[in-house]
Image: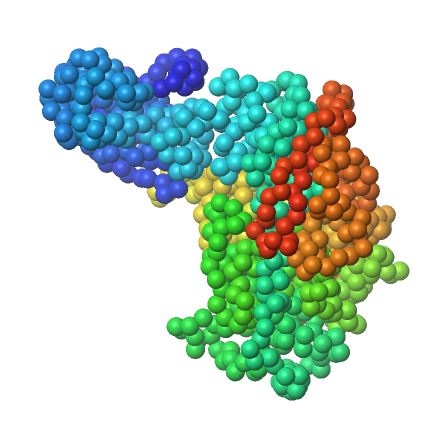
């Protein structure tokens, strides 16, 4: 154990003056978690100081590699379990190796150490003393004077390390405050080097371990007295802030000024120190040299996102360049379209026919259109067309031993389910299609090659840069691929605006469907959506329609009005699944959290104090609740935005709960998932949800409040996405000015360079490229170029939220100083990308919402609160 660790432990002891222990042989392992180190053991007690009169005790805790029939010393405390009674909860444990001379000699000459006889064991103990094991573990070279054969020495050291080292590692990780799941992930990554790696550079955890952030690493570094000015600290903070800036804005790159500003704030606030901005800028250069970030003109990218954009462009070129061995004739295609049109009883209009024709004859095709313009109709048509032209049988049961020739996929489980329902064919999430588990280390992780002749991806606006790159890499050149979406919806949660950018590039075959079919007497929602898309509210916006209404109210009235509207909807037979409240923000009187509580009490009230429920993060969870999964968890086949229902709550004290832990079981459309407490942060109630999370889903009734408090969230694509989620009924409430503001507030574009990469890969010179510095021109040499540039960006540049530290003059001045320092110029040497030579840029680091089914007779006004009727 190092001094630092010893300090940590003594600190623990300081807080816990009475150190309780149990020493004993592990007789059985009752429970062993599959994804963490948590175990429940039965221990035969040989020694203890906990007032225990029985021979055996149950010991729980985080233990690595426990061997049954081996003696351990457990330190911790006794706890009384509601069902199992008194147990010993261990914070620390160690292999109880003997400490007396004779005990040590017997241990070292025992079965664990083949090749070591009694005499050699005596020599070891006599030479190294009774702390021989600690000395050997600290430095195996102490064995040199003993003169052991190399093989025997290696076995001795290895076995001692296994018997003692792993425990020490887990104890060390526990002491650093890591829970069992993170401890398992860290150990899986560094193995026996874990503690040494952390002690040398705790910031390595930020890069290597999902779930460990800069602040955690920085706390450990502070405990280890690592200099706050250390290069590794500055680099970790820079990487964290590039990621944060890109995640916060959905950009694929950032620029020097916001990056340096935010990084300085992070570094200075965390350890209350001043950081030299020049030193920080130097580390940006170092990160580029280490190939962790890429500077291109005034843009700064994380390497993964930089390469993902290049790869997307290159992969699309590869697919589009593929030549058909047997190209389809116009005549064959036109005749097949006729057949499909007759069989489906649809007369395709001119642009729909053009879309069918272009899509079926292109290797890559993009189809966009607003709600009700026929995207689903075209997907169905394409499937039928492909089957006819390629002699494919559309009966999945006939493909037992070979892959179905048409793959359909979407970014979320709900969108995939809708796709399967509308086509009558299997559809999956993109993650599942690619066999992604979510545990991949990086975007470049190779995924399997897809099989079949045609791939159609729906809800393309939700696909981010990294996932798209993984998808394209898996598509074989002979496969046709069609991307379908609505370009005016919100972009992906992850970085990029892939569909938007692809549509900007006219070399990619594409068609926008603009004729709206689902309208007339049975829908005023779709025309409303199209009007919003075009930047205006219709004149009848506040006039009640058969399927839509507007209730004027202020932010403080929203909750009460929604309570009345939902109460009436429930009385008319609407279920919690039918009614969806969408709001832009979580906090506030009209925010998602408050509305969730209100609507939960209507659809799933707590009926008695004995009903199973639990509280987490200020929200009450009950069996029957509608809940939302907040992240992509491909390992459980549940995705960001998936909605499920709580079907089980197991409390630790339940007699039949074998895990003896609190857990929630949720049924999703596709499967059931059990969430341990450590996963509850992936959940929230779903009666009310953010518009972002509703992407890819539709609901019979959407209730949408818009009030001035939502301020900067009042944007056109947000309102458009919310309105298009309503299948049959839309109830808008709030103040008209907020809706007007949303419509006029044109959606902010993200900072991406995908369209630029496409132009580069296609070798197309465009006029706006002339405005940009030549790849081979003199490199911008310092922060000045980047910082100056970010100052001149106007529309489209995401605005930096005012940080708590905006009045910190020193930090602000520091950035200016760095920007002024023309001498500190640094540019990295050109580095090739993965692409063809001609594409290689000079890498210059500048520090630089069907008809009204079942709705007959029900009008939105039926749900209006009495006061407004
Ligand atoms: N050419 C056409 N002639 C008659 N009806 C059509 C035509 N094209 C589409 N429709 C009908 O219009 C309605 C909307 O079409 P579809 O569902 O394909 O649009 P969509 O773009 O997928 O809409 P959303 O994005 O809202 O799901 C459907 O009822 C469909 O049958």
Side (left or right) of 527 relative to 617: right
Q: Quick check: 124 above or below 171? A: above
Please identify the quarter of the rendering in which residue 186 is found: top left
Which quarter of the picture shows residue 549? bottom right
Residue lying at 78% horizontally and 57% vertically, measured from the top left = 766
User: Which of the pair 200/334 is nearer the observer?
Assistant: 200
Q: Which quarter of the rendered picture does the N terminus lie within?
A: top left
452 displayed left or right of 415? left
**Residue 135 in view, yes or no:** yes
Q: How is the image coloured?
A: rainbow
Where's residue 699, x and y in %?
65, 59
Task: Please name the residue shown 76% across and 32% down the image.
Answer: 784
Image quadrant where one finds the C terminus: bottom right
Position in image of residue 6 (x %, y %): 39, 16
Left or right relative to 225: residue 356:
right
| Residue 206 at x, y percent in the picture | 53, 33
Residue that appears at 71% across and 42% down: 297
Residue visible at 63% across and 84% down in the picture: 329
Instruction: For residue 104, say whether it is visible.
Output: no
Report the number of discs: 0
Observer-nearest of 94 and 118: 118
Q: Quadrant of residue 175?
A: top left
Instruction: Residue 129: give x, y in percent of width and height.
Output: 22, 12
Whether 779 is drawn above or below 333: the answer is above
């Amino acid at each position: 154990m190092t001094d630092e660790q010893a300090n940590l432990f003594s600190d623990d002891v300081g807080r816990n003056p009475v150190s309780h222990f149990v020493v004993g042989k592990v007789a059985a392992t009752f429970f062993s978690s599959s994804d963490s180190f948590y175990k429940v053991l039965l221990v035969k007690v040989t020694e203890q100081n906990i007032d225990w009169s029985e021979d055996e005790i149950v010991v729980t805790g985080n233990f690595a590699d426990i061997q049954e029939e081996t003696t351990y010393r457990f330190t911790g405390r006794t706890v009384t379990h509601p069902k199992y009674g008194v147990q010993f909860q261990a914070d620390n444990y160690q292999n109880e190796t003997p400490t007396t001379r004779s005990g040590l000699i017997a241990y070292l000459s025992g079965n664990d150490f083949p090749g070591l006889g009694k005499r050699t064991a005596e020599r070891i103990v006599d030479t190294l003393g009774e702390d021989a094991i600690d000395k050997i573990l600290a430095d195996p070279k102490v064995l040199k004077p003993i003169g052991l054969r190399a093989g025997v020495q290696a076995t001795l050291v290895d076995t001692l390390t296994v018997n003692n080292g792993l425990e020490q590692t887990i104890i060390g990780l526990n002491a650093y405050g890591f829970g069992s799941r993170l401890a398992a992930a860290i150990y899986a990554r560094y193995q026996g080097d874990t503690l040494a790696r952390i002690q040398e550079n705790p910031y390595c955890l930020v890069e290597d371990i999902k779930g460990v952030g800069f602040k955690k690493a920085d706390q450990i570094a502070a405990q280890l007295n690592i200099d706050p000015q250390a290069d590794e600290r500055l680099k970790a903070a820079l990487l964290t802030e590039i990621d944060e800036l890109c995640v916060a804005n959905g950009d694929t790159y950032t620029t020097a000024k916001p990056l340096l500003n935010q990084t300085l704030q992070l570094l200075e606030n965390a350890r209350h120190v001043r950081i030299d901005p020049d030193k920080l800028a130097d580390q940006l250069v170092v990160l580029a040299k280490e190939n962790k970030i890429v500077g291109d003109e005034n843009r700064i990218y994380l390497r993964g996102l930089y390469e993902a954009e290049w790869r997307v462009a290159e992969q699309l070129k590869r697919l589009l360049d593929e030549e058909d061995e047997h190209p389809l004739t116009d005549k064959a295609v036109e005749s097949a379209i006729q057949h499909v049109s007759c069989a489906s009883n649809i007369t395709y209009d001119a642009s729909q026919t053009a879309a069918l024709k272009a899509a079926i004859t292109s290797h890559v095709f993009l189809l966009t259109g607003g709600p009700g313009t026929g995207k689903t109709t075209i997907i169905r048509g394409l499937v039928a067309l492909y089957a006819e032209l390629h002699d494919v049988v559309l009966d999945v049961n006939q493909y037992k031993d070979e892959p179905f020739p048409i793959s359909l996929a979407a970014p979320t489980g709900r969108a995939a389910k809708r796709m399967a329902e509308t086509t009558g064919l299997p559809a999956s999430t993109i993650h599942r299609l690619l066999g992604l588990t979510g545990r991949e280390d990086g975007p470049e992780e190779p995924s399997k090659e897809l099989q079949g002749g045609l791939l159609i991806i729906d809800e393309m606006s939700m696909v981010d840069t990294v996932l798209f790159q993984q998808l394209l890499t898996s598509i074989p050149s002979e496969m046709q691929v069609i991307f379908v979406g609505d370009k005016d919806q919100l972009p992906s949660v992850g970085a990029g605006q892939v569909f938007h950018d692809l549509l900007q590039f006219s070399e990619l075959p594409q068609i926008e469907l603009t004729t709206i079919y689902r309208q007339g007497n049975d829908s005023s929602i779709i025309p409303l959506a199209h009007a919003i898309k075009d930047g205006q509210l219709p004149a009848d916006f506040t006039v009640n329609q058969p399927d839509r209404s507007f209730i004027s109210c202020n932010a403080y009235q929203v909750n009460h009005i929604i309570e009345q509207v939902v109460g009436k909807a429930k009385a008319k037979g609407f279920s919690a699944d039918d009614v969806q409240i969408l709001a832009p923000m979580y906090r506030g009187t009209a925010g998602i959290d408050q509305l969730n509580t209100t609507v939960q009490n209507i659809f799933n009230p707590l009926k008695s104090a004995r009903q199973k429920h639990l509280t987490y993060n200020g929200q009450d969870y009950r069996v029957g609740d509608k809940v939302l999964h907040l992240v992509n968890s491909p390992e459980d086949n549940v995705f960001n935005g998936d909605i499920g229902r709580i079907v089980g709550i197991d409390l630790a004290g339940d007699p039949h709960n074998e895990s003896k832990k609190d857990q929630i079981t949720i049924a999703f459309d596709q499967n059931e998932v059990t969430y341990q407490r450590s996963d509850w942060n992936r959940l929230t109630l779903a009666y009310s949800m953010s518009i972002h999370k509703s992407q890819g889903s539709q609901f019979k009734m959407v209730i949408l409040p818009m009030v001035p408090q939502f301020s900067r969230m009042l944007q056109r694509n947000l309102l458009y996405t919310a309105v298009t989620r309503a299948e049959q009924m839309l109830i808008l409430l709030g103040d008209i000015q907020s809706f007007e503001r949303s419509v006029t507030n044109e959606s902010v574009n993200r900072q991406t360079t995908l369209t630029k990469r496409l132009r580069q890969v296609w070798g197309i010179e465009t006029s706006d490229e002339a405005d940009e510095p030549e790849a081979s021109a003199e490199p911008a040499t310092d922060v000045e170029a980047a910082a100056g540039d970010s100052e001149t960006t106007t529309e489209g540049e995401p605005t930096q939220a005012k940080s708590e530290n905006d009045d910190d003059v020193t930090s602000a001045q520091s950035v200016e100083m760095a920007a002024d320092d023309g001498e500190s110029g640094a540019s990295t040497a050109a580095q090739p990308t993965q692409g063809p030579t001609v594409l290689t840029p000079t890498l210059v680091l500048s520090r630089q919402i069907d008809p009204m089914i079942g709705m007959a007779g029900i009008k939105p006004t039926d749900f209006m609160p009495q006061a407004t009727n």
